[in-house]
Each structure stands twice: as structure tokens, then as C-alpha cells.
């Protein structure tokens, strides 16, 4: 589909990409969402924690929510999404990736931007244990890349899966990594690296023969982390191999489920390769909206309902 025109125009302060990103990630809070946790055992013996929140009235509609790098189901962009969806007749299932629910996972591997095998198991688990006739996906950043890859890489997508929304998506992971390593994003990169290293040290306690102190000392950047841990733990040659094979951009042409991508033009995490104009123009199932403002998962909205939260609801309702 052609690019969609966006009418998103936030107040002056939120037109700064950095302000919007930081406010939404650190300052914003969402109240009134009740989550019930389910522990799901994966086929390799590891686990995922799923946080469910329900519509006040019985429904057969469900949205699976997928967080970003080093996020979790308690982040405001997840609980905010759950709140408006619950209020409008959708149950939600917020997935905490391996090691992201407050407890280390038990295998050497963890999660990454292309780990669709875990998403496949989540979808199958829901279909086998619940009675939903309509299922939708909504993902942010890494989670957006994950869902788009899942939809386009040739999986047996169930008939119940009706649509998807992906927000602030690094469709080209190498391009996004280069942006994160640039001076404009140094504070974000330091924060991400610190969180990842803390988890890696926990992983080292469980697997001392696979992660050495020398390995950890070599990690100076996010790319180093992917070279030393992500690629080795998940079967890639190195970071570049991981980025190439896990980027959703190459899978967009074959997506057949109606999918909306919302990437702000002032998202400092995204380079030009992360705006898939050609892919969306040539695939009638894809919709691309590129608002001038929004930062990285930094969209604002009145009454603490962000633009993308309302936009996703409207998109799902239209299908």
C-alpha cells in the first residue's frame, strides 16, 4: 500500500525526538491495569512469563504485546497498550522474553531480535489453551522487528491471526546498530549496554565455562555484545551475520497479514534503511506511516493515551 499520511502533531516539547523518547521511557506511568502471570514452559525446557490482562466483558479477541530491547511487560508502552485495548473489548497477553520477567532464564541462550521460534510457541500455546477467534500482534522496536519477521519468513500463520502493528521498528538491524553507536545516542547505548552486561554476568554464574571475565571485558559497545554473546549463544557467525539474518526488512514482501508500521522520522535509533518505503508500496498487506515526530516509542497523546495506542486500536477495529 502507498505510504499513509499521518496527522500526529504533539505539543512543542514532544516534537523533540530525544525529549519524547526519554519522557515515554522514564517519566510516563500507567495505572489501572491488572495483570495475571502465566509461566509457559518452552520446548527446550526454558520458560517465558506471560502477563495477561482482560477486557471487563468476555471477548474472543486477543492482542499479543511484544516489548523492546531490555523491556518487559510492565513498561508503560505495554501497560498503556493493554489498558486501551482492554477498555475496548480486547484481552491482551504481554510476553516477557527469556530473562526479562525479573528472573534469569535457565538456558545459555536468551532472546534476540529474530527469535521467532519463541513467538511461534507462544501463538501455538494460546491456540491450544484458549478460545480466541481473532488474534492480533503489536510490537515495539525489537518486538516490532520480531513480529514482522515472524509474519514474513514462511511460518504457518494461523487463520485466527488477523493483523499486526509494529511501532519504531529497526527493520534493518545493522543500520539501527550504527545509529545507536553514533554520538547522538551515546546515553541510550550506555544504558542498554549496562543492562545487558548485568544480565550477562548473571548468565556467567550459570555457565562459567561459556562466558569468561575476558569476554566481558572485551565488550565496549552494543555490537561487541552481539559479537561475543548474542551471535555465539544463538547460532550466528558474528554480529553482522545476526543482523543480516534477523532483520525483518527482507521478509516484508511476503507478509500476507494486514500490518501497519509506524516509524517516526525523528527516531534517532533508525537510519534510512529502517523506513521500508519500497516494500510497503509493493505489498498490499503492508501499511507504512512515518510521522514527523515521535522519537523512539515516544508518541504522546491526550489523557495518557498515546497516538500509537489509539492508532493500533483503530487499525485492529478496521480489520
Image (cartoon, rainbow, N blue to C red):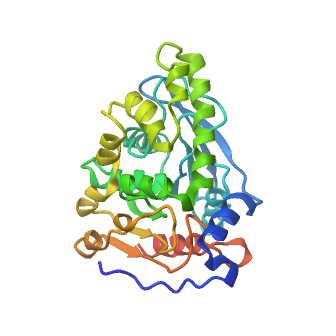
Asked if residue 110 is positioned above or below residue 107 in the image, the reply reads: below
Image spot of residue 132 (x, y percent): 47, 53
Count every numbered label the image shows and give the total.
Answer: 0
Q: In the figure, is residue 64 to the left or right of 87?
A: left
Residue at 54% x, 48% y is: 69
Asked if residue 275 is positioned above or below residue 232 in the image, the reply reads: below
Image spot of residue 262 (x, y percent): 46, 70
Residue at 28% x, 47% y is: 155
Tell me if residue 133 can be seen.
no
Give the camera-side residue of 188 and 202: 188
Hey, which quadrant is residue 239 in on the image? top left
Q: In the figure, is residue 75 to the left or right of 182?
A: right
Give the camera-side residue of 298 and 269: 269
Residue at 41% x, 72% y is: 319
Tell me if residue 191 can be seen.
yes
Q: Quadrant of the N terminus?
A: bottom left
Q: In the figure, is residue 210 to the left or right of 279?
A: right
Image spot of residue 52 (x, y percent): 62, 48
Image spot of residue 288 (x, y percent): 38, 74
Residue at 48% x, 49% y is: 131
Residue closest to the far top: 209
Amino acid at each position: 500500500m502507498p505510504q499513509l499520511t499521518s496527522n500526529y502533531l504533539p505539543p512543542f516539547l514532544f516534537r523533540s525526538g530525544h525529549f519524547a523518547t526519554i519522557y515515554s521511557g522514564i517519566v510516563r506511568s500507567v495505572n489501572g491495569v491488572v495483570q495475571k502471570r502465566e509461566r509457559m514452559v518452552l520446548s527446550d525446557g526454558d520458560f517465558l512469563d506471560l502477563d495477561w490482562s482482560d477486557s471487563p466483558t468476555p471477548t474472543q479477541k486477543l492482542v499479543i504485546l511484544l516489548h523492546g530491547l531490555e523491556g518487559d511487560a510492565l513498561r508503560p508502552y505495554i501497560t498503556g497498550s493493554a489498558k486501551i485495548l482492554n477498555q475496548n473489548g480486547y484481552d491482551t497477553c504481554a510476553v516477557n522474553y527469556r530473562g526479562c520477567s525479573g528472573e534469569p532464564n535457565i538456558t545459555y541462550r536468551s532472546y534476540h531480535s529474530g527469535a521467532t521460534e519463541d513467538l511461534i510457541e507462544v501463538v501455538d500455546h494460546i491456540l491450544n489453551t484458549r478460545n480466541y477467534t481473532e488474534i492480533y500482534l503489536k510490537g515495539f522496536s525489537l518486538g516490532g522487528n520480531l513480529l514482522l519477521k515472524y509474519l514474513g519468513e514462511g511460518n504457518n500463520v494461523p487463520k485466527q491471526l488477523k493483523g499486526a502493528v509494529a511501532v519504531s521498528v529497526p527493520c534493518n538491524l545493522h543500520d539501527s546498530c550504527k545509529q545507536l553507536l553514533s554520538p547522538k545516542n551515546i546515553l541510550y547505548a550506555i544504558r542498554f549496554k549496562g543492562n545487558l552486561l548485568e544480565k550477562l554476568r548473571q548468565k556467567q554464574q550459570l555457565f562459567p565455562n561459556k562466558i569468561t571475565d575476558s569476554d566481558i571485558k572485551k565488550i565496549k559497545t552494543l555490537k561487541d555484545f552481539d559479537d561475543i554473546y548474542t551471535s555465539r549463544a544463538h547460532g550466528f557467525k558474528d554480529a553482522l551475520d545476526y543482523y543480516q539474518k534477523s532483520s525483518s526488512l527482507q521478509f516484508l514482501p511476503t507478509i500476507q497479514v494486514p500490518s501497519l508500521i509506524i516509524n517516526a522520522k525523528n527516531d534517532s535509533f533508525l537510519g534510512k534503511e529502517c523506513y521500508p518505503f519500497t516494500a510497503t508500496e509493493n505489498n498490499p498487506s503492508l501499511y507504512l506511516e512515518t510521522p514527523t515526530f515521535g522519537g523512539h516509542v515516544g508518541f504522546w497523546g491526550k489523557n495518557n493515551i498515546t497516538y500509537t495506542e489509539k492508532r493500533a486500536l483503530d487499525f485492529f477495529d478496521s480489520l
